[in-house]
Image (cartoon, rainbow, N blue to C red):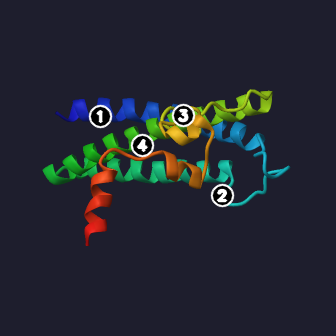
Amino acid sequence: MNEILIIGLCITAIFSVVSSVLLLRVGIRIDQHPSPDDGERKRSLASPIETTRICVGLYWVFFFLGVLALLEGSRTFMILGITAFIAIVVFMITVLIFSFSVLGIMQRRKKGQGSPAPAGSPAAAAGTSKNPAEKAGRKGRAFARTYRPPGSAFIEKLFRRG
């Protein structure tokens, strides 16, 4: 059983080293692309490279805590260590996917192509409104006089009687 844990630990360590280096490089590339609002990016804890360094540092803290839990030997700590490794690997995969998508959006924006709106977002649905007044080009009170949702006549009759 210990051999399986050691092999899993080695595979996780190799994945962790590779993904940490990759994440730091992607963070540096993201930091090189300024946002359209400000001309030059300010160096603070909120800048992409600093946030990436903090994230990688926390990752390694939890990695070593997982190693210590596995080396403890009791069943409870073994389960805790395995759970910690699964959680940090899923965390690292999520961070890598997010970082690469942000880098892709920033590179497209730099080339002038802009960023496509994600499916289901208000920007993507701007041209596909189901509101009849927006389709007809009417706004405001004119819409209130012309369009009646189904069942509204019945509700109006109930309130007029009282």
Residue 154 placed where, x, y %? Answer: 27, 53
Residue highlighted by disc 3: 118
Q: Distance between the residues labelled 3 and 4?
A: 22 Å
**Sooner in the amino-acid sequence: mark 3 or mark 1:** 1
| Secondary-structure class at tag 4 | helix
Q: Distance between the residues labelled 3 and 2?
A: 25 Å
Residue 76 placed where, x, y %? Answer: 16, 53
Q: In the orientation shown, which residue stands out farthest toward the left?
A: 75
Question: Which mark is on residue 91?
Answer: 4
Q: Residue at x 45, y 38 (%)?
A: 94
| Secondary-structure class at tag 2 | loop
Q: In this view, does 83 lie above or below 13?
A: below
Left/right of residue 91 with respect to residue 121 in the rendered view: left
> Is the residue marked by circle 2 packed among few (<14), some (14-19), or many (20+) residues within 10 Å?
few
Residue 16 placed where, x, y %? Answer: 46, 36
**Sooner in the amino-acid sequence: mark 3 or mark 2:** 2
Q: In the orientation shown, which residue stands out farthest toward the front?
A: 161
Specify the quadrant of the image occupied by residue 24: top right
Tag 2: amino acid:
Ala
The one nearer the camera, 148 or 55, is: 148
Tag 4: amino acid:
Phe
Q: Which residue is drawn at 52% across and 36% down?
A: 129
Q: In the orientation shown, which residue stands out farthest toward the right?
A: 39
The one nearer the camera, 127 or 1, is: 127
Q: Do callouts 2 and 1 mark residues in contact (Cβ within 8 Å)? A: no
Q: In the orientation shown, which residue stands out farthest toward the bottom?
A: 162
Tag 1: amino acid:
Ile
> Is the residue marked by circle 3 packed among few (<14), some (14-19), or many (20+) residues within 10 Å?
few
Left/right of residue 85 with respect to residue 105 in the rendered view: left
Q: How far apart are marks 2 and 4 (CA)?
A: 19 Å
